[in-house]
């Protein structure tokens, strides 16, 4: 059970401060907890009786807000006091306690005083456990705030603890409708189910011998950045900049969020994190709603919500519980994967969701989607400004975060292998880690692939699997991943006799292709178990090697449990572990059936883009040539934007074709060159997905004298995100117009840091221009160039990183356009020339601004 009692931080902080001594100077290393407590050791300023009084105040503080029998409170105080005294009874350091997190630290303390709650009634024990988790949260928050070492070494955990404290304060201040005991008991049970179900993360491809397939979410979750882009018809600043937020904190500042992200960018993992964090804090009741579960039927009514997603507790919920939760404004709706609904069904799904949010106001909502599946303002409704959806996009992982992911991945792998007694592996894993960090920095193709958690996980696993020899292209990466998962996974894990089915990789892959192709044709992201078994039964007669191993049911169980690519949903449906594998295998099946031409009818649809690209990568040269010619042919039944989209897909496919008739290549160029003359910035940015081929179609920069047209060329080229674009952008760097220089500066984050700094950034006139830095590599490169007077912080960085990277002799204007890990900016006093601090009004308010620095939310560029 994960009980939910919340104590406001204002009062709780004062109580926790009495438990710990004030250090003479900020700690620079982990500190043993017994040495920090006020009642332990020589010269202790307090005694155990003081801890008992603190426990009594904690209990009284919580009892005022929760109906607890008065007669039981003294017993709860005694147990809580004994539990808090256990802080000084064992050798944990403050950093180790923070690493555990509030729930596990509370569990650790309870384990240190086993049997202490034996005399409590079930209600009193529930209250004690809930209060202990809350008290531990505030203890850990105190330890984080007192220790620069913890803030520096555990920044993600420190941020998460601060988030939970904020959530407690928000809920403590909110209206608390009275709940029945039945509702409260079910809610606690439901919250624990959420934690158990979503509190684990599977990293694709991580499958070492004798190692588990999953890790606790708290250990492997990496906070990603989200962009709130302005300009181009999207909310925000008039200058068209992007605001950078920590994605897992988006719902703190915005009640409703539409979050876009490409396949593998971490949308579903973010949903898991928010669900678990919310369930543990008790601030709201999280409802994880995978759209694939109700894609055809539309958004379910509240009473049907749990049944619609086939939740295992649906039949046990008190009647009307979901409705009462929504009426109280305590729900958090996590609607995952709008793009997994058929295109024709998305409008009705949206309308039902908006209607529910209008009827049940005050509830939080996060909606996720692939970028091209819904247009800007999709959830807005004319005349209903209170819909309140802010549109964010998950940003590609910065170089700092890629480095952090690779190190955390190898750390988790090393920790697990060492736990199995394989200590000789430590040095080997460290070598793989360093080799991979080097490869990702210098190889363009790897750097382009390593932009989201899915790809980073695959690259780490393959690097380890192949002793540092990596495939570079996307198709080759997935081919290698499938080889690892389908052929080598079980033998290398010494899992040889898990069932009686013996299939080779090729056979397994063909069977999986059948399931993926069926999902594609039926516009489904999952299949009912019966349907999947039926597909396999129909396939087996044509595959003697598989037919000899069993019927459709036996083969289905084998594919489900032994390939690592399928997962079962509530016992009656199945889907792929990630949509990208489904798209890849479906594309391969289409080519195997000789039906590449059938994709022409779908090439104008955004959700088919990955299938089209991967099908072309698998096809034979003659097939590719015919297919591309068909894409370029007239299509009277399509609207002009759809025809253009289809033709641009032909250009995008050239990147994936291994061999193609030069005449067809010329035809693609001729038919698409006039499409890359965008008239708006939004259209120019939209050309980036086409890839490097678009650079060959753009006009020569020297032939475009008009600054407005030159700006659109810069927007298009920076959106290509291939280092080949640098050669084109070099020819724009001497333009004097500020919008062009600003666009070139913004493009830095998409390219090799050092090369872009030397060839572009170094040549931009600094007059009136804010130079954006999105990670520490860019910050260091800018300082190596001699610094700049105006700097925009466009990525999440710690105070010490900014102090090390900003040039005190140059800085006069600083623009904070990303979240800071600490809102205290007194450190800016070290920059004597700083005159103006520009702060985005949508970010948390900064404090302790040095005297003489003008702070503004809207300083003209």
Image: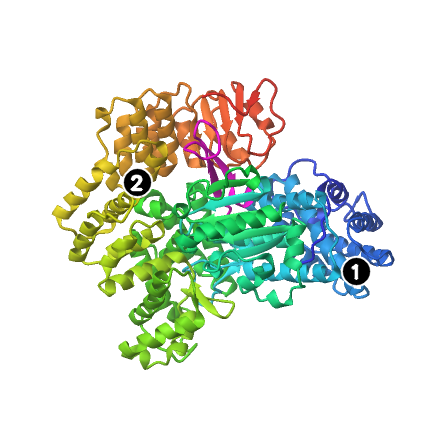
Left or right of residue 668: residue 837 = right
Q: Secondary structure at mark 1?
A: helix
Q: Is residue 841 left or right of residue 139?
A: left
Quadrant occupied by the C terminus: top left
Residue at which label 2 appears: 722
- Picture coordinates of residue 741 (x, y %)? 36, 25
Res 589 seen here:
yes
- For the rendered model, the colour scheme is rainbow
Q: Secondary structure at mark 2?
A: loop
Percent position of residue 84, x then y: 75, 53
- Asked if one can make out residue 208 in the rendered structure from this viewpoint, the answer is no
Q: Is residue 512 above or below residue 700?
A: below
> Which residues, given as a range, are shown in magenta?
222-250
* Quarter of image, res 27: top right
Q: Is 475 covered by the magenta stretch?
A: no
Q: Quadrant of the N terminus?
A: bottom right
User: Relative to 489, is 709 above or below?
Assistant: above
Counting from the top left corner in percent of width and height, residue 538 is at 33, 76
- As for residue 231 lying within the magenta part, the answer is yes
Judged left or right of residue 810, residue 639 is left
**Residue closer to the observer: 67 or 270:** 67
Q: Nearer the viewer, residue 406 or 649?
A: 649
Distance Cα–Cα, label 2 vs label 1: 61 Å
Q: Which residue is mark 1?
A: 124
Looking at the rendered structure, which numbered label has been put on residue 104? none
Q: Looking at the image, is mark 2 or mark 1 earlier in the sequence?
A: 1
Q: Residue at x 29, y 59 (%)?
A: 587
Question: Crowdedness of circle 2 by 10 Å Cα count: few (<14), some, many (20+)?
Answer: many
In percent of width and height, residue 194 lies at 59, 59
């Amino acid at each position: 059970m994960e009980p939910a009692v919340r104590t406001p931080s204002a009062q709780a902080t004062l109580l926790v401060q009495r438990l710990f001594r004030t250090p003479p100077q900020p700690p620079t290393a982990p500190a043993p907890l017994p040495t920090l407590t006020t009642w332990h050791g020589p010269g202790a300023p307090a005694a155990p009786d003081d801890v008992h009084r603190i426990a009594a105040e904690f209990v009284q503080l919580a009892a005022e807000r929760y109906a607890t029998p008065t007669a039981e409170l003294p017993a709860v105080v005694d147990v809580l006091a004994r539990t808090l005294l256990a802080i000084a009874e064992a050798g944990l350091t403050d950093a180790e306690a923070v690493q555990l997190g509030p729930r596990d630290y509370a569990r650790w303390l309870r384990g240190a005083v086993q049997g202490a709650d034996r005399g409590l009634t079930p209600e009193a024990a529930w209250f004690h456990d809930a209060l202990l988790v809350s008290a531990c949260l505030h203890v850990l928050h105190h330890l984080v705030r007192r220790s620069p070492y913890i803030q520096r070494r555990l920044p993600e955990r420190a941020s998460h603890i601060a988030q939970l404290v904020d959530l407690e304060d928000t809920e403590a201040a909110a209206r608390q409708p009275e709940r029945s005991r039945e509702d409260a008991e079910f809610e606690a049970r439901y919250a624990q189910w959420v934690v158990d179900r979503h509190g684990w993360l599977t990293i694709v491809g991580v499958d070492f011998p004798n190692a588990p397939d999953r890790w606790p979410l708290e250990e492997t979750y990496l906070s990603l950045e989200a962009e709130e882009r302005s300009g181009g018809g999207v909310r925000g600043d008039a200058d068209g900049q992007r605001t950078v937020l920590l994605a897992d904190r988006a719902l703190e500042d915005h009640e409703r969020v539409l979050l876009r992200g490409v396949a593998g960018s971490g949308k579903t993992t973010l949903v898991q994190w928010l669900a678990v964090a919310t369930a543990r804090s008790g601030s709201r009741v999280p409802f994880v709603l995978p759209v694939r579960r109700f894609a055809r039927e539309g958004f379910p009514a509240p009473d049907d919500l749990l049944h619609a997603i086939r939740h295992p507790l649906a039949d046990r919920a008190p009647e009307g519980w979901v409705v009462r939760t929504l009426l109280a404004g305590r729900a958090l709706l996590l609607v995952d994967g709008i793009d997994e609904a058929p295109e024709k069904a998305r409008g009705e799904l949206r309308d039902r969701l908006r209607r529910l949010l209008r009827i049940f106001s005050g509830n939080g909502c996060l909606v996720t989607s692939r970028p091209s599946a819904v247009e800007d303002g999709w959830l807005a409704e004319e005349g209903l400004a209170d819909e309140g959806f802010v549109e964010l996009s998950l940003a590609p992982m910065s170089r700092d975060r890629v480095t952090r992911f690779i190190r955390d991945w190898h750390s988790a792998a090393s920790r697990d292998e060492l736990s199995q007694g394989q200590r000789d592996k430590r040095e080997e894993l460290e070598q793989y880690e360093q080799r991979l960090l080097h490869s990702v920095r210098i190889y363009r193709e790897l750097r382009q692939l390593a932009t989201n958690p899915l790809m980073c996980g695959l690259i780490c696993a393959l690097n380890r699997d192949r002793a540092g020899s990596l495939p570079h292209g996307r198709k080759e990466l997935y081919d290698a991943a499938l080889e690892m998962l389908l052929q080598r996974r079980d033998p290398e894990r010494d899992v040889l006799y898990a069932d009686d089915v013996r299939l080779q990789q090729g056979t397994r892959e063909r069977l999986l292709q059948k399931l993926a192709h069926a999902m594609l044709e039926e516009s489904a992201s999952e299949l009912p178990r019966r349907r999947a078994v039926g597909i396999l039964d129909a396939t087996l007669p044509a595959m003697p090697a598989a037919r000899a191993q069993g019927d459709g049911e036996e083969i289905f169980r084998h594919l489900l449990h032994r390939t690592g690519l399928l997962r079962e949903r509530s016992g009656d449906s199945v889907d792929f572990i990630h949509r990208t594998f489904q798209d890849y295998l479906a594309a391969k099946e289409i080519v195997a059936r000789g039906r590449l031409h059938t994709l022409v009818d779908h090439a104008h649809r955004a959700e088919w883009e990955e299938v089209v690209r991967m099908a072309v990568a698998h096809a034979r040269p003659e097939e590719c040539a015919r297919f591309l010619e068909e894409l370029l042919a007239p299509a009277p039944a399509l609207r002009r934007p759809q025809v253009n989209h289809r033709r641009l897909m032909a250009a995008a496919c050239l990147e994936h074709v291994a061999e193609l008739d030069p005449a067809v290549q010329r035809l693609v160029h001729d038919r698409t060159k006039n499409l890359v003359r965008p008239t708006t910035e939004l259209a120019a940015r939209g050309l980036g997905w086409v890839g490097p081929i678009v650079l060959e179609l753009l006009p020569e920069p020297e032939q475009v004298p008009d600054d407005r047209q030159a700006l659109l060329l810069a927007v298009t080229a920076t959106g290509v995100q291939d280092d080949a674009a640098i050669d084109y952008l070099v020819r724009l760097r001497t333009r004097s117009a500020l919008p062009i220089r600003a666009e070139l500066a913004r493009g830095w984050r998409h390219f090799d840091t050092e090369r872009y700094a030397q060839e572009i950034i170094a040549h931009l006139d600094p007059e009136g221009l804010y130079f954006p830095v999105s990670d520490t590599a860019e910050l260091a490169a800018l300082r190596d160039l001699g610094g700049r007077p105006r700097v925009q912080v466009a990525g999440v960085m710690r105070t010490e990183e900014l102090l090390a990277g900003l040039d005190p002799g140059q800085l006069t204007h600083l623009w904070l356009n990303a979240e800071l890990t600490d809102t205290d900016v007194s450190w800016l006093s070290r920059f004597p020339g700083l005159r103006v601090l520009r702060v985005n009004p949508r970010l948390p308010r900064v404090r302790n601004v040095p005297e003489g620095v003008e702070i503004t939310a809207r300083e003209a560029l």
